[in-house]
Each structure stands twice: as C-alpha cells, then as structure tokens.
Image: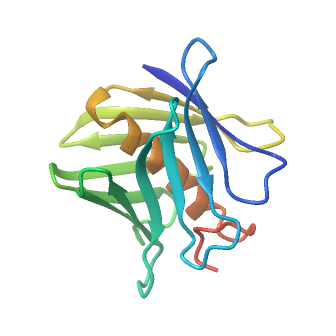
Amino acid sequence: MKYRLKQKIFSLTDSFNIEDEQGRIAYTAKGKLFSLSSSQTLFDHNGSELLKIKRKYLTLLPACRLLNRDGSEWLIRKKFWPFWTSRFSISTPEGQLEMTGNFWQHEYEIRQQGKLLAGISKKWFSWSDSYGVDIYAPQWTAQLLAAVIVIDRMQHSDKNSSLGDN
C-alpha cells in the first residue's frame, strides 16, 4: 500500500496528514502545543488513537518510543556509525528492524532480516516535508508510518523540531 506523508505548513505543532493512494486522509499525527514531553499522537481516519510517539530522554543519540494502543512498545534509535549514511535501529516485540538511508537523507528502507518492510522517498522540492511511503508489511502500517515521522524529526533536530535532540 502506498501512502503520502505531508507535514502541515501552518501548524504550531508538528502535525502530519497521511493520505492513501486515492488521496484520502488515512491517518493524522498531531503534536501538543504546550507539551513538555515532545509527544505526538497518531490517529486513524475515524479519529481513533493508534499510538503515541514520545522522545526518550537521557540517551547519547536521539531515540523515540512508539507506545502502541495494545501496550507494546517500539524503540527507534539513531546509529552513530558510519557517518556517511543515515542508520536507525528499531526494536520491536517481533524483533529488530533496520532503517537505512543514503547520504543525502532522501531515500530510506526499513528491513527485517533482509526482508523489505517499507520504502520511503522524500520529495525534493516542497514547501513542507513530504514523503512517499510504500508499505509491504500491512500489519505494521501505523508503526512504520510513525517511524517515518520520527526519522524526519531526528533528521531536522536543528530546525525547531519537537522530537529533535535540541
């Protein structure tokens, strides 16, 4: 399934609309205006809460937790090495995932033991951050889309991001 993540331009919080292949809003991610915890919530098209994205403090490198509605947790950490790539590890109850991207940070893949779970491509010329996401593991759609939001925040930590390492 293909999705398009588009950051809202005129928003006081980090908010995203996520459209499906037909251009309908399938998910929304909303941050809180006066939140000390730098959290966001992912909602489905009916407005039901699916998960929360929370920054993990007291870590050497940026990290965020995805707190799922069922109580399970995913942990996303930026990797330090090598410098010329963007690499993240994603710990899930179902095992370890790896997210890798190119030097320019515009193309990513999320894999588990070599199996492609999602392909992500950032739109080059856009007023706001916009990503195309191909999901190959539909059981994890919400979590994989939330992971893209987390990576975007970590990559733009110097641009007033609520999830960055400021």
Say which quarter of the image contains residue 134. Answer: top left
Question: Is residue 106 placed above or below 51 in the rendered structure?
Answer: above
User: Can residue 109 be seen from the camera position used here?
Assistant: no
Which residue is rendered at x = 42% and y = 58% of the image?
Answer: 87
Q: Is residue 40 left or right of residue 15?
A: left
Q: Split into 4 quadrants, where in the image is the N terminus?
A: top left
User: Can residue 94 be seen from the camera position used here?
Assistant: yes
Q: Residue furthest left?
A: 94
Q: Is residue 58 left or right of residue 29?
A: left
Which residue is rendered at x = 68% and y = 56% of the image?
Answer: 14
Q: Nearer the viewer, residue 60 or 149?
A: 149
Q: Is residue 9 left or right of residue 89?
A: right
Q: Nearer the viewer, residue 94 or 13?
A: 13
Which residue is rendered at x = 57% and y = 71% of the image?
Answer: 38
Residue 91 position, x and y percent, is: 25, 59
Question: Is residue 121 placed above or below 68 in the rendered structure?
Answer: above
Q: Residue furthest top?
A: 22
Q: Is residue 34 left or right of residue 12?
A: left
Residue 16 position, x and y percent, is: 64, 43
Q: Split into 4 quadrants, where in the image is the C terminus?
A: bottom right
Residue 31 position, x and y percent, is: 62, 58
